[in-house]
Image (spheres, helix red, strand yellow):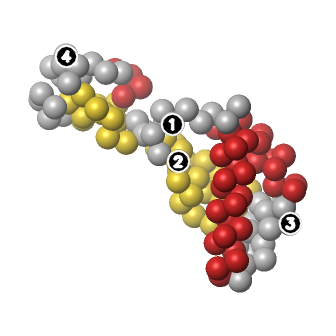
Amino acid sequence: MHELGVVFKVIDNLKEVAAENGIEKIDKVKIGLGEVSTVIPEYLQDCFKWAKRKSPLVEDCDLEIETIPAVSYCEDCGKEYPTVEFAKICPSCHSEHTYLLRGNEFVIKEIEVP
């Protein structure tokens, strides 16, 4: 389960931001999580609930996860399409010359303080 390592990295980043800005408590953090990022949202929530008890900065913090839809681009017809539904094959022209545009991200989008 790599979600625990991801959570530790998020908390480290939050500590860094807090130190730079004189913040003592964080109430909420919003994560943008790509639909095909390989991070499982439920596991991420569970790991965060466990790990936040180890740091006073985030012990009362809520984690909000916003899903970023996976979208692919077809190089042959120039159209974008939903990756999860159609995978590597373009639904418009049936080409395999496609690549992922977005949906693999993991980003801290917002931090809410008291």
Callout in the foreground (1, 4): 1
Residue occupying the point 66% across, 53% down: 9
Residue on which disc 2 sits = 106
Residue 61 against residue 24 in the figure, above or below: above
First in sequence: mark 1 vs mark 2: 1
Residue where numbered disc 3 is placed: 56
Return the x and y of residue 42 as percentages of the image width and height: 69, 35
Look at label 3 and name its amino acid. Pro
Q: Secondary structure beneath disc 4?
A: loop
Residue 10 found in image quarter? bottom right
Residue marked by disc 1:
37
Q: Quadrant of residue 111?
A: bottom right
Q: Position of residue 106 (x, y in %)?
A: 52, 48
- Label 4 sits on what residue type? His
Q: Is residue 32 left or right of residue 44?
A: left
Q: Specify which label sits upstream in the sequence, 3 or 1.
A: 1
Tell me whether the residue at label 2 lies in contact with that at label 4, contact meaning CB atoms closer than 8 angstroms.
no
* CA neighbours of label 2 inside 10 A, class few (<14), some (14 to 19), many (20+): some
On screen, residue 59 above or below 106 = below
Q: Along the horizontal axis of the image, is 101 left or right of 77? A: right
Q: CA distance from mark 2 to mark 4?
A: 29 Å
- Separation (CA) of disc 2 from disc 3: 24 Å
Name the disc covering residue 111, or none: none
C-beta proximity under 8 Å, tags 1 and 2: yes
Q: Position of residue 107 (x, y in %)?
A: 53, 53
Residue at mark 3 to residue at mark 4: CA–CA distance: 53 Å
Viewer can see residue 90: yes
